[in-house]
Image (tube, coloured by chain):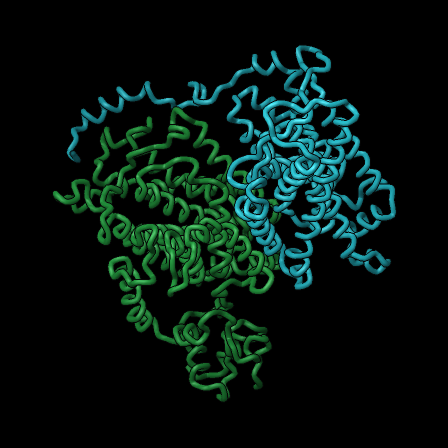
């Protein structure tokens, strides 16, 4: 049997076209326990970055802890948006609407300014935030269902505009329903977890009042977001490798073909939309707890574009890619903010930081022309078979190019990929 | 803090209930029909004026969509550039922003306005063609999926806005662009020409509606009765066959962008006449979405639909504003957009540019 790889990627000898191809190849070949063994210390290292204060890396103009907390939040948003845009291929320009609904759910239920405040009735202030997070996720997911069930029947570009309108409507509702949401004044004193109350931190470590670096509220919220990101990644990762994930890929690649092959496209598109919305609500709840103050201006439609930028920049469809994208869009402007010299070269950091939308816009245009797949492109995996099989294929590639087993070098599903692997008989 | 008696809960919950504005009818959202009926005609006049401007911008969306099946998201920024373009031309003609209105003869005023309009058209048209060259053409060459085009358009929208926001003031010594709106240059004093049914019709309203209708008529003739227009319709209907018949697709696409941009420039001048304080880097965004809504309402890809949709949207938006209050105006427009897309995505007059009656 001859090698049946017919993808350009494998013939060129470079399985992916992303940043750090070799690292990724090596990583994918590792067994799951090894991955955890390396991954966990790495995550812990990232978690302690704001404490370590590495000279050039640490931001100058704003507190590094809160920058990282913001990164964690946007990363969560990006993972959620990635489910919708990257995996199912639905362009959602109103994602900020779900983010706003999540934030406002928490704020409406726990802020003393809101008519629906529960914390002065039966809900303990200490745990109100944690109590409201699942509610926020549920309400946002339901709103995703309500928005999605009529609109997902529309063509792709119409969907983008409807969701854009939805995002604007949510913001305008928050702005105009003054008696409920406080209008432009917003809702203040949103609940947050009261942990670690001491004489030093009378309101606990999560309070916005705890601002002295490095052990400030930003750091604590960053840790919360890391935990949430890991949980969400596990959930989304498992979905991706399930029937649902395969259906999403099929829809993204060719909706009509998927429908003909028996994939109930509408159902799975709705699933993607609802799951994405739920994750958006989660990050909104995280946001409300972190800043403890929500105003409509923070949910401008421009933010939707910003989120989209994270997904596109990082690589649509790649979970780690979009986290990298979120890091780039949050960290880079803050890196320049307040910086006057970089490696001895004097720069006007504030001006560079204020141009961020200009640079991100340019980045989008240039990326779309030269590298539409983003920094860390999504890979086409052997989705039809298990993770173990996929890794076996990887190991075969690493072990040497000259072997006889006709494993597709990049694990790409080509015409007879799975069958070829099985016949290879190495496992 | 966390220990509460059940009775406490019930009492406090009960006591708090009447204060909760749970229902919209309790006055959370105004609903005032008398305001609509008492000022019906003046709302209609204002609505038609705004609608005429929406219609001109909508033509740009419709043409590009008809030919390329692409929502040119950056079209709102093309319009915004047109506002700056006509402003710069007036500046160049020696007008400076001042509190009161310049007074000169009617003929001279019309002449200056025409020059300003041509300036706006040139800037918008040039920008639209430039955008097509720089951003969209490379994508077409690669046969990129439509999502890619849309993301590019969003990026271009960012770039153009931020260009006017930050870069333009640096290039022009702070005279144009920047964070705040331009100081208005007023050439026309808005005066009531005639009244009917309690509605005051001003000279500006008349100029805008007539100019928009005239331009719409010209575009309609251009697309439906000239050789260039036949090319546009041919490509919209079937690009491959049109190419085989000797129509240059690339040239048609360029013409389409140019035409849309030119009309956006004209709309920009008319809009600045109505809202002299509206010349700001972010001023195109909402207007662009509304114009898109108008295009969809009338049937995207359909020229006459764009005109009809624009006028309808402008009027409905103002009726909604009268019913619910000023702050709900944008919401009305977005809700109309969403409803139209849900229930009749092909719009009132149907979609096709290619099948537009010649």
Q: Is residue B243 above or below residue A103?
A: below
Q: Position of residue B235 (x, y in %)?
A: 79, 52
Q: Is residue A309 left or right of residue A37?
A: right
Q: Position of residue B201 (x, y in %)?
A: 70, 17
Question: Foreground residue, A138 or A230?
Answer: A230
Q: Residue at x 80, y 47 (%)?
A: B233
Q: Residue at x 64, y 47 (%)?
A: B71
Q: Residue at x 65, y 57 (%)?
A: B134
Count the numbered circles shown: 0
Q: Is residue B118 above or below residue A249?
A: above
The picture's colour for chain A is green
Image-quadrant location for residue B27:
top left
Q: Position of residue B76 (x, y in %)?
A: 62, 41
Q: Is residue A82 left or right of residue B246?
A: left
Tell me the quadrant of the picture where the C terminus of chain B can be found. Answer: top right
The picture's colour for chain B is cyan
Q: Is residue B55 left or right of residue A69?
A: right
Q: Is residue A7 above or below residue A317?
A: below
Tell me the quadrant of the picture where the N terminus of chain B can be found. Answer: top left
Q: Position of residue A162 (x, y in %)?
A: 56, 41
Question: Foreground residue, A267 or A329?
Answer: A329
């Amino acid at each position: 049997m001859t090698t049946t790889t017919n993808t350009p990627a494998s013939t060129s000898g470079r399985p992916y076209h992303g940043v750090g191809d070799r690292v990724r190849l090596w990583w994918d070949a590792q067994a799951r326990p090894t991955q955890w063994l390396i991954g966990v210390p790495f995550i812990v290292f990232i978690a302690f970055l704001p404490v370590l204060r590495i000279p050039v890396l640490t931001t100058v103009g704003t507190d590094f802890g809160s920058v990282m907390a913001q990164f964690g939040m946007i990363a969560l948003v990006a993972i959620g948006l990635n489910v919708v845009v990257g995996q199912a291929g639905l362009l959602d320009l109103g994602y900020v609407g779900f983010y706003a609904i999540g934030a406002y759910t928490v704020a409406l239920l726990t802020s003393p300014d809101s008519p629906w405040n529960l914390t002065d009735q039966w809900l303990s202030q200490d745990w109100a935030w944690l109590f409201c997070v699942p509610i926020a996720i549920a309400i946002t997911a339901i709103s995703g269902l309500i928005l999605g069930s009529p609109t997902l029947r529309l063509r792709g570009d119409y969907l983008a505009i409807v969701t854009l309108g939805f995002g604007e409507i949510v913001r305008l509702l928050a702005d105009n329903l003054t008696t409920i949401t406080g209008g432009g004044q917003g809702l203040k004193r949103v609940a947050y977890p009261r942990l670690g109350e001491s004489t030093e931190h009378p309101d606990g470590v999560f309070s916005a009042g705890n601002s002295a670096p490095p052990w400030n509220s930003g750091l604590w919220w960053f840790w919360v977001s890391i935990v949430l990101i890991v949980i969400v990644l596990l959930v989304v990762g498992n979905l991706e490798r399930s029937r649902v994930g395969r259906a999403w890929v099929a829809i993204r690649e060719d909706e009509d073909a998927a429908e003909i092959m028996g994939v109930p496209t509408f159902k799975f598109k709705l699933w993607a939309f609802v799951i994405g919305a739920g994750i958006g609500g989660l990050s909104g709840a995280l946001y409300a707890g972190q800043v403890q103050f929500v105003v409509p201006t923070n949910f401008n439609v421009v933010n939707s574009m910003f989120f989209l930028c994270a997904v596109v920049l990082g690589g649509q469809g790649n979970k780690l890619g979009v986290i990298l994208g979120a890091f780039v869009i949050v960290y880079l402007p803050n890196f320049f903010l307040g910086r006057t010299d970089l490696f001895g070269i004097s720069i006007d950091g504030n001006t560079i930081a204020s141009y961020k939308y200009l640079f991100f816009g340019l980045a989008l245009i240039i990326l779309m022309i030269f590298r539409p797949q983003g920094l860390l492109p999504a890979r086409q995996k052997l989705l039809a078979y298990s993770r173990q099989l996929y890794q076996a294929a990887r190991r075969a590639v690493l072990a040497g190019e000259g072997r006889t087993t006709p494993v597709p070098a990049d694990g790409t599903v080509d015409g007879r990929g799975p069958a070829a692997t099985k016949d290879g008989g190495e496992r | 803090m966390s220990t509460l008696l059940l009775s406490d809960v019930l009492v406090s919950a009960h006591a708090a209930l009447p204060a909760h504005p749970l229902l919209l009818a309790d006055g959370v959202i105004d609903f005032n029909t008398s305001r609509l009926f008492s000022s019906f005609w003046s709302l209609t006049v204002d609505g038609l004026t705004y609608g005429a401007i929406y219609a001109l911008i909508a033509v740009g969306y419709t043409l590009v969509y008809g030919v390329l099946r692409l929502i040119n998201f950056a079209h709102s920024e093309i319009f915004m550039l047109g506002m700056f373009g006509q402003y710069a031309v007036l500046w160049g003609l020696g007008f400076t922003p001042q509190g009161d209105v310049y007074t000169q003869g009617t003929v001279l005023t019309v002449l200056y306005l025409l020059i300003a309009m041509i300036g706006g058209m040139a800037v918008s048209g040039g920008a639209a063609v430039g955008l097509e060259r720089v951003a969209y053409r490379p994508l077409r060459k690669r046969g990129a999926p439509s999502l890619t085009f849309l993301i590019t358009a969003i990026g271009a929208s960012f770039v153009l806005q931020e260009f006017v926001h930050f870069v333009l003031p640096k290039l022009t010594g702070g005279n144009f662009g920047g964070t705040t709106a331009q100081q208005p240059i007023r050439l026309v004093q808005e005066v009531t020409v005639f009244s009917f049914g309690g509605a005051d019709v001003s000279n500006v309203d008349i100029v805008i509606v007539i100019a928009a209708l005239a331009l719409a008529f010209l575009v309609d003739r251009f697309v439906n009765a000239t050789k260039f227009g036949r090319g546009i319709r041919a490509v919209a209907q079937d690009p491959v066959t049109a190419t085989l018949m000797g129509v240059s697709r690339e040239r048609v696409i360029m013409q389409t962008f140019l035409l849309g941009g030119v009309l956006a420039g004209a709309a920009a001048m008319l809009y600045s006449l109505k809202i002299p304080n509206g010349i700001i880097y972010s001023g195109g965004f909402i207007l662009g979405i509304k114009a898109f809504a108008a295009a969809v309402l009338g049937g995207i890809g359909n020229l006459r639909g764009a005109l009809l949709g624009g006028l309808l949207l402008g009027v409905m938006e103002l009726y909604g504003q009268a019913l619910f209050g000023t702050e709900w105006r944008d919401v009305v427009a977005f809700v109309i957009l969403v409803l139209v897309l849900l229930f009749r995505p092909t719009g009132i007059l149907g979609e096709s540019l290619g099948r537009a009656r010649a």
